[in-house]
């Protein structure tokens, strides 16, 4: 099979951070997480909070930056409740600052 | 004026132009059914199994291009729909599926006939809704129809709790939805594609179901004629170009003709229009069209570069892109390449043994075609018969051919044929089926009889799951296991029991005449013919192999 199916060493793996603007209602998280899960694409970290008046939420995802990420991003963009997707490097502060809560 | 959520839903469906829906009632959907009965404006077709209702809705959608609608109750009603909805997702068929749900206050309590319909439907739909307030219905229904038809079409599921159906709301003004605008086509990509086509020496046009969905068959044929492009079609695109068009090289892939796959092997440019490089079409991806650059036109951006990297990818509606592309494509006769294609065609044509015998597999397909004109609609189930029909039937127009491509669902054919007949009552609808497939939704014979639809079932009976039998014979050391049925089933009596006419070609002294007579009559009929279980679909690319590694044919 091709190299994409080989599970890489998580620690050495390059990562990326995705920032999603989504409509805020029950079910959005399932749509997003299910999309990754059924493609066997691991999500390392996830954060979600409502923004503004609560009509929208922002979801932050920490994911592996492998060859499938471009396809995953396109699939996420197709979700009806996802308004836009921005990609950041793994050094984005959002997960780094959070690390204090996990030690 | 006040009305209930259920009454509002009926008004909203009317506003979307829905005149027929297929479904089965049940406790959690009863307010909806009561509202349908009171309004009397929408024809309800009572299926015998919710999967049948889903495929009837699909048949309506595939034949007409407009969203089909199906309706069911909660719990098992919803789970029974899942297969038909998943099938619509994989073949990009516009569908709106409406289910009743237990009352809001009981959701999550394991109430009677409660299932997590919202959760179940996520992976098999384009989008889904759980409606929490009757006042949300106008927006939800409008969005559901808009999403089902816009961009790449697909199924949308709307789950409505029983108390939302009975909740009283003020009647709003309702109107039909407007589909989303199609994406802007990038001019430089179009110009680049035209230049590649103009410069290519051995180009091939590769059409997929997107051409049918976009209503672009004539534009695709014009492109082929203008640029001198040999044209192959996927299973989903059959009919996009008439199969007897001089530029048609037929269906590609696992059961395509040898010459078709050989032509693709030699191509230096592949123009993929509304297709998605499915594994049954392209075989081993790395070895497909090894010498070809690729132009990929698709309305779904996530299809471009998904399986094969495109040298030029153009996101857009196929019609819009081809309209922009055509003025830049030079007229070419391409004598050298087309003569090479014709030479491959004559040295490696599709072999169809027994074509003259109406009681053999290819012969029966051909005999049926001889009785019909291009106005007829052909549906199939899934298996050997499906591939024989795809190979041998002369498809000449879009939406003439309705088949389960992506999901490959046995049981599709009969209910889809009923739906097609409901949507296009002026057309004769013929469902080719096998004994394995037919038994997966055989109860819909009763629905066909109820509705009196002009549906003819051609049952190719080999008392076996033929394609499983074939693969065990070819690839599993001839160990035929769980493929052959132990005893023959009397399908004639079953059909008659459901109220269909039935003709057995096995017992006919003049099978051609019996067939013609049965096809010419009005109303649902079963036409039975035994087929040798050892007949195979050839050529065959072994699963996982490259397309040029064909066996047989």
Image: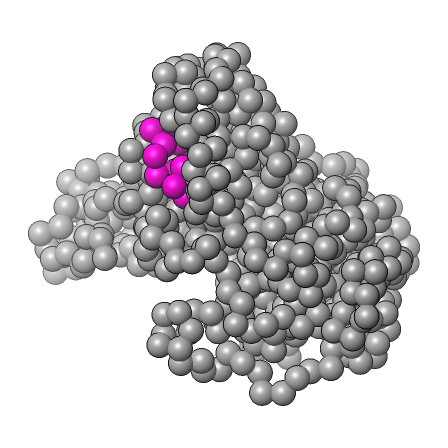
Q: Residue at x 86, y 73 (%)?
A: B499
Q: Residue at x 85, y 46 (%)?
A: B426
B503 displayed left or right of B308 = right
User: Percent position (x, y) of residue B536?
Assistant: 51, 65
Start-end of magenta stretch = B261-272
Q: Quadrant of residue B76?
A: bottom right
Residue B316 vertical position relative to residue A45 in the rendered view, above or below: above
B276 displayed left or right of B426 = left
User: Percent position (x, y) of residue B152?
Assistant: 54, 39
User: Percent position (x, y) of residue B208?
Assistant: 52, 40
The furthest residue to the bottom: B487
B106 displayed left or right of B550 = right
Judging depth in this view, the residue of B519 and A45 nearest the camera is B519
Q: Is residue B222 visible?
A: yes
Q: Quadrant of residue B44?
A: bottom right
User: Percent position (x, y) of residue B369?
Assistant: 72, 50
The colour scheme of the drawn protein is one colour
Q: Is residue B440 visible?
A: no
Q: Quadrant of residue B138?
A: top right
The magenta stretch spans residue B312: no
Q: Residue at x 86, y 59 (%)?
A: B517
The magenta stretch spans residue B266: yes
């Amino acid at each position: 099979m091709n190299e994409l199916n080989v599970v890489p060493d998580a620690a050495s793996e390059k990562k990326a951070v995705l920032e999603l603007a989504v409509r805020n209602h029950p079910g959005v998280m399932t749509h997003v997480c299910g999309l990754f899960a059924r493609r066997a694409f691991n999500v390392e970290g996830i954060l979600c909070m409502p923004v503004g008046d609560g009509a929208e939420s922002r979801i932050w995802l920490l994911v592996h930056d492998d060859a499938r990420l471009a396809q995953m991003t396109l699939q996420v963009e197709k979700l009806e409740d996802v308004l836009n997707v921005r990609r950041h490097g793994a050094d984005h502060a959002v997960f780094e600052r959070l690390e204090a809560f996990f030690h | 004026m006040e009305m209930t959520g259920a009454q509002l839903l009926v008004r909203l469906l009317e506003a979307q132009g829905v005149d027929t829906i297929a479904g089965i009632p049940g406790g959690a959907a009863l307010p909806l059914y009561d509202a349908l009965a009171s309004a009397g404006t929408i024809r309800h077709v009572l299926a015998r199994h919710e999967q049948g209702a889903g495929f009837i809705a699909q048949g309506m959608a595939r034949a007409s291009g407009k969203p089909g609608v199906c309706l069911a109750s909660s719990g098992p009603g919803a789970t029974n729909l899942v297969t038909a909805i998943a099938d619509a997702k994989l073949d990009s068929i516009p569908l709106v599926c409406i289910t009743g749900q237990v009352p809001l206050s009981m959701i999550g309590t394991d109430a009677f006939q409660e299932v997590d319909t919202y959760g179940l439907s996520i992976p098999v739909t384009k989008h889904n809704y759980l409606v929490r307030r009757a006042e949300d219905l106008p927006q939800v229904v409008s969005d559901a129809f808009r999403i089902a038809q816009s961009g790449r079409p697909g199924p949308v599921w709307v789950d409505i709790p029983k108390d939302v159906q009975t909740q009283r709301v003020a009647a709003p003004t309702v109107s039909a939805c407007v589909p989303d605008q199609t994406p802007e086509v990038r001019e430089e990509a179009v110009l680049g594609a035209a230049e590649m086509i103009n410069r290519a020496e051995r180009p091939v046009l590769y059409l997929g179901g997107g051409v049918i969905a976009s209503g672009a068959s004539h534009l695709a044929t014009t492109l082929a004629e203008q640029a001198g492009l040999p044209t192959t079609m996927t299973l989903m695109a059959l009919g996009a170009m008439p199969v007897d068009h001089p530029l048609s090289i037929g269906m590609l892939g696992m059961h395509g003709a040898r010459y078709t796959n050989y032509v693709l092997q030699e191509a230096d440019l592949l123009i993929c229009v509304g297709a998605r490089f499915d594994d049954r079409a392209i075989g081993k991806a790395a070895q497909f069209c090894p010498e070809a650059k690729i132009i990929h036109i698709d309305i779904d951006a996530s299809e471009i570069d998904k399986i094969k990297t495109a040298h030029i990818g153009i996101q857009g509606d196929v019609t819009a892109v081809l309209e922009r592309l055509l003025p830049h494509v030079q007229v070419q006769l391409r004598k050298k390449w087309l003569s090479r294609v014709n030479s491959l065609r004559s040295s490696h044509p599709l072999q169809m043994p027994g074509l003259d015998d109406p009681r053999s597999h290819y012969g029966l397909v051909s005999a049926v075609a001889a009785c019909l004109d291009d106005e007829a609609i052909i549906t199939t189930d899934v298996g050997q018969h499906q591939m024989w029909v795809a190979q041998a039937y002369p498809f000449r127009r879009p939406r003439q051919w309705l088949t389960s491509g992506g999901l490959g669902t046995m049981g599709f054919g009969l209910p889809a044929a009923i739906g097609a007949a409901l949507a296009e009552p002026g057309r004769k609808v013929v469902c080719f089926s096998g004994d394995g497939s037919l038994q997966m939704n055989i109860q819909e014979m009763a629905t066909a009889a109820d509705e009196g639809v002009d549906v003819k079932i051609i049952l190719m009976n080999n008392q076996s799951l033929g394609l499983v039998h074939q693969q065990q014979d070819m690839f599993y050391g001839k160990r035929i296991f769980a493929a052959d049925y132990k005893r023959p089933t009397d399908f004639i009596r079953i059909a008659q029991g459901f109220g269909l006419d039935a003709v057995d070609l096995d017992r006919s002294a003049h099978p051609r005449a019996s067939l013609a007579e049965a096809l010419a009559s009005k109303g649902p009929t079963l036409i039975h013919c035994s087929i040798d279980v050892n007949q195979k679909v050839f050529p065959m690319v072994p699963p996982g192999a490259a397309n040029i590694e064909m066996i047989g044919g």
